[in-house]
């Protein structure tokens, strides 16, 4: 691989340690509650079961520069399966190159190949910069809020 080129590639179990470190950084940056055990378990499930979705690593040479997690959901309003772009994180020193767009395009190709016709994503209310980028990419604001009730 060209050391100066970024590339999105599917994650493998060998990426787990670095992926969990980046997940911790993402949760801290986005001011989200982070349960290390729950997160590690979910990532391991996802890596072991592609029917749930996928994880892509952003690589620059031999360095993991970020990650993107896409989850397959099901919704009647979407005519069945859809993809939730669940998490996107790029390490600060690698930001500003538009690599998120290439990651989204990679997920779009993957979803289209699986016959999935809709992508969704969440963006925190305090992250207006990201929201504006996503709107410019073609997402629409559904004017909804996501509510959560933990069962465990």
Image (cartoon, grey):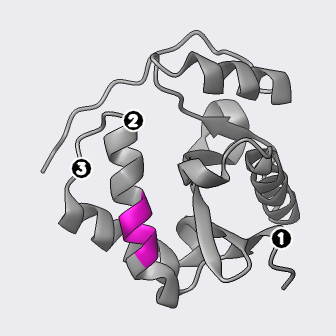
Q: Residue at x 82, y 60 (%)?
A: 106
The mark that comes first in sequence, 3 or 1, is 1
Q: Which residue is mark 1?
A: 4
So how many labels did they put on this image? 3
As drawn, the residue found furthest toward the left would be: 152
Q: Position of residue 43 (x, y in %)?
A: 41, 70
Instruction: Say if 47 sits above or below 14 in the image.
Output: above
Q: Which residue is mark 3?
A: 34
Could you tell me which secondary element the residue under label 2 belongs to? loop
Q: Which residue is mark 2?
A: 30
The mark that comes first in sequence, 1 or 2, is 1
Q: Nearer the viewer, mark 1 or mark 2?
A: 1
Region of the chain picked out in magenta, as a range? 18-22
As drawn, the residue found furthest toward the bottom would be: 14
Q: Position of residue 143 (x, y in %)?
A: 58, 9
Could you tell me which secondary element the residue under label 3 belongs to? loop
Q: Tell me, yes or no, whether the highlighted magenta stretch contains residue 19.
A: yes
């Amino acid at each position: 691989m060209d050391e100066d080129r970024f590339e999105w590639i599917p994650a493998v179990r060998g990426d787990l340690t670095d992926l969990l470190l980046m997940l911790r950084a993402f949760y801290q940056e986005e001011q989200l509650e982070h349960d290390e055990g729950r997160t590690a378990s979910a990532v391991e499930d996802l890596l072991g079961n592609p029917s749930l979705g996928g994880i892509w690593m952003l690589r620059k040479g031999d360095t993991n520069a970020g990650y993107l997690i896409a989850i397959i959901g099901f919704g009647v309003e979407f005519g069945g399966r859809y993809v939730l772009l669940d998490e996107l994180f790029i390490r600060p020193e690698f930001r500003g190159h538009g690599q998120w767009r290439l990651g989204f395009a990679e997920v779009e190709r993957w979803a289209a190949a699986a016959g999935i016709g809709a992508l969704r994503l969440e963006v925190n209310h305090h992250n207006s910069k990201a929201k504006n980028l996503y709107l410019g990419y073609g997402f629409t604001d559904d004017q909804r809020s996501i509510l959560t009730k933990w069962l465990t």
